[in-house]
C-alpha cells in the first residue's frame, strides 16, 4: 500500500441494536475474584450510573428530531468502548467526557465485560415465553493494514470480538454485505442494512459493531379479546383511533405531580418496561427535564396497586447517524485527520479516524410481549381502581431491575410509527 493511501485510511465504528418487545439492589453483581480482579460491585454500579447518564445525554440530543425515538445506550457505549481502547491523547480525553467514560482506566474494560456478563444472565431460562437478551460484538479489518496485537487481544478478551479479515479494497460490496448480514443474524433479522451503500472502500481501516436483541413476554399478558380501537391524541391535538390493549392488574404505579408512571414487568421479573405519561399538554416540559436521576426517583416511588391499564399497540424503527450528536457532546477529534487512535496500530500519524457512527433500533409491542404466541387472560372488572390509559404521547424505558441499567429508552409520539 502506498504512503498516500495509508494516510487516508479511516476507522469505521457502528452500533446496532434491536428491541423486540411488546411493549434495585446489586446483589447479583460479580464480586472481585482472581480471574477478574477489578470488576467488583462498586465498579459495576459506577459503570451503570455512567451509562445511564449517557442515555440521558443521547436522548436529549436526539429528541430534537421529529417523531418516535428509540436508543440503546449500552450498545452505543460498548461499541464506542471498543474504539476507546485504542484512543490516546486529546481524542481519548474527549471520548471520556462525551461518553461518560469516567472510570479508573485500569479496570474500565473489565468492568464493561462484567456488566455485560451480568446482563446476559437474564436470558438463561428456557421455554416459549422465556426472556431472551443477547449481546454480540464484532470487528472486521483488512490484512494489508497494521493492527496492534495487544489491541486485538483486548477486543477478544473483554468484548468477545474476534477480528475477521475482509478485502475492503478489492471487494467493498461483498465486505459490506458480510457485515450487514452479521448484524441481521445477531438481531434475528430485525436490523437490516445497518451499513449504508458506499461506506466501505479501500481506505476503510476497521469496522466495529455491537448488537443487542431482546425478546420478552409480559409477566401479566393482555387478552387480545379486549383489544379494541381507542382514541389517541397526538401532540398537535389531532385524534386518531388505534388498537389499544386493556386490562386490570396489580402493577407498581404512582400518580406524580404532572405525570403518571407504571411498571410492566417481563417474565422473570428481572427486566421491566416503565411507562411515563405526562399530563395533557405537558409532554415537552416533562421531556426537557427528564434524566436518569429522575427515572431512579420515579422507580423508587412506585407502589403496587390495582389499576386499569390501556396501552396502544406500536411498532417502529429508529435510525441515526451519531457523528454530529457525538461531536455536539464534545467528541470532536475522533472524526477527522489528526485523531489519535495510536493504540490500534502503534503508529502516531493522525490516522485512522471515525468516519461513520450508525445506530439503528426496532421495537414491537403487542398483547403478549415479544414474539410470544401464548396469552393469559387478565381479569376484567369494573371497580374504583386508578386508570392509566396511554392515549397521548408517552416515554418508555426498558430497564434491568437488579443493576438499574437502562437497556432501551424511547418515546411514542404516534403509535402508527
Image (cartoon, rainbow, N blue to C red):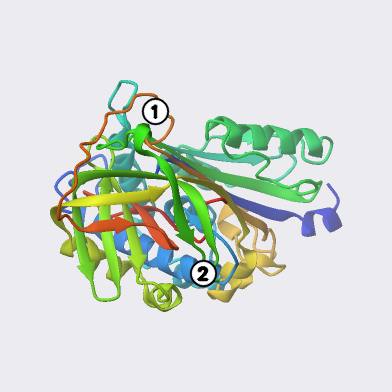
**In the image, what residue occupies the spot 33% across and 67% down?**
292
Residue 105 placement (x, y as % from top left): 37, 61
Residue 56 placement (x, y as % from top left): 41, 68
- Return the residue found at the far front: 382
SS under mark 2: loop
For residue 368, say whether it is visible: no
Which numbered tag is attached to residue 268? none
Q: Name the side, left or right, on which 260 lies relative to 201.
A: left
Residue 265 vs 288, above or below: the answer is above
For residue 193, say whether it is visible: yes
Residue 108 placement (x, y as % from top left): 36, 56
**In the image, what residue occupies the spot 41% across and 58% down?**
391
**In the image, what residue occupies the spot 72% across and 34% down?**
177
The residue carrying pointer 1 sits among few (fewer than 14), some (14 to 19) or many (20 or more) residues within 10 Å by Cα, namely some
- Return the residue found at the far top: 127
Q: Name the side, left or right, on which 287 lies relative to 202.
A: left
Q: Name the side, left or right, on which 350 lies relative to 410.
A: right
Of 358 and 397, which appears nearest the observer?
A: 397
Separation (CA) of disc 1 from disc 2: 32 Å
Residue 257 placement (x, y as % from top left): 24, 76
Q: Quadrant of residue 10?
A: bottom right
Residue position marked by numbered label 2 in the rendering: 235
Q: Name the side, left or right, on which 28 lies relative to 368.
A: left
Which numbered tag is attached to residue 372? 1
**Marks 1,2: beta carbons within 8 A:** no
Residue 126 vs 352, above or below: the answer is above
SS under mark 1: loop
Q: Earlier in the sequence, mark 1 or mark 2?
A: 2
The residue carrying pointer 2 sits among few (fewer than 14), some (14 to 19) or many (20 or more) residues within 10 Å by Cα, namely some
Amino acid at each position: 500500500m502506498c504512503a498516500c493511501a495509508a494516510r487516508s485510511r479511516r476507522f469505521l465504528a457502528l452500533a446496532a441494536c434491536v428491541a423486540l418487545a411488546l411493549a434495585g439492589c446489586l446483589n447479583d453483581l460479580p464480586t472481585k475474584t482472581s480471574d477478574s480482579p477489578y470488576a467488583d460491585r462498586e465498579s459495576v454500579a459506577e459503570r451503570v450510573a455512567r451509562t445511564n447518564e449517557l442515555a440521558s445525554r443521547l436522548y436529549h440530543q436526539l429528541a430534537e428530531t421529529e417523531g418516535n425515538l428509540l436508543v440503546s445506550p449500552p450498545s452505543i457505549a460498548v461499541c464506542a468502548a471498543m474504539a476507546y481502547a485504542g484512543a490516546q491523547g486529546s481524542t481519548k480525553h474527549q471520548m471520556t467526557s462525551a461518553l461518560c467514560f469516567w472510570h479508573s482506566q485500569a479496570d474500565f474494560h473489565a468492568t464493561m465485560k462484567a456488566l455485560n456478563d451480568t446482563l446476559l444472565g437474564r436470558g438463561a431460562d428456557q421455554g416459549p415465553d422465556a426472556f431472551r437478551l443477547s449481546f454480540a460484538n464484532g470487528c472486521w479489518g483488512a490484512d494489508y493494514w497494521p493492527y496492534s496485537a495487544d489491541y486485538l487481544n483486548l477486543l477478544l478478551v473483554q468484548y468477545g470480538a474476534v477480528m475477521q479479515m475482509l478485502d475492503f479494497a478489492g471487494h467493498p460490496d461483498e465486505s459490506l454485505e458480510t457485515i450487514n448480514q452479521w448484524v441481521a443474524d445477531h438481531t434475528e433479522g430485525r436490523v437490516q442494512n445497518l451499513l449504508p451503500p458506499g461506506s466501505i472502500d479501500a481506505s476503510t481501516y476497521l469496522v466495529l459493531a455491537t448488537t443487542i436483541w431482546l425478546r420478552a413476554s409480559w409477566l401479566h399478558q393482555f387478552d387480545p379479546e379486549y383489544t379494541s380501537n381507542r382514541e389517541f391524541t397526538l401532540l398537535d391535538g389531532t385524534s386518531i383511533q388505534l388498537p389499544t390493549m386493556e386490562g386490570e392488574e396489580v402493577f407498581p404505579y404512582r400518580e406524580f405531580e404532572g405525570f403518571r408512571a407504571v411498571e410492566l414487568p417481563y417474565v422473570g421479573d428481572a427486566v421491566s418496561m416503565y411507562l411515563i405519561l405526562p399530563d395533557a399538554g405537558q409532554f415537552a416540559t416533562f421531556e426537557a427535564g427528564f434524566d436518569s436521576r429522575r427515572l431512579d426517583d420515579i422507580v423508587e416511588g412506585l407502589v403496587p396497586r390495582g389499576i386499569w391499564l390501556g396501552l396502544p399497540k406500536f411498532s417502529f424503527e429508529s435510525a441515526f447517524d451519531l457523528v454530529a450528536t457525538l461531536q455536539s457532546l464534545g467528541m470532536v477529534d475522533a472524526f477527522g485527520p489528526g485523531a489519535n487512535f495510536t493504540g490500534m496500530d502503534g503508529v502516531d500519524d493522525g490516522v485512522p479516524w471515525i468516519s461513520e457512527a450508525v445506530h439503528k433500533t426496532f421495537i414491537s409491542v403487542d398483547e403478549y410481549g415479544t414474539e410470544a404466541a401464548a396469552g393469559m387472560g387478565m381479569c376484567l372488572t369494573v371497580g374504583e381502581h386508578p386508570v392509566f390509559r396511554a392515549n397521548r404521547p408517552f416515554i418508555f424505558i426498558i430497564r434491568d431491575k437488579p443493576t438499574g441499567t437502562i437497556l432501551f429508552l424511547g418515546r411514542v409520539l404516534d403509535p402508527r410509527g
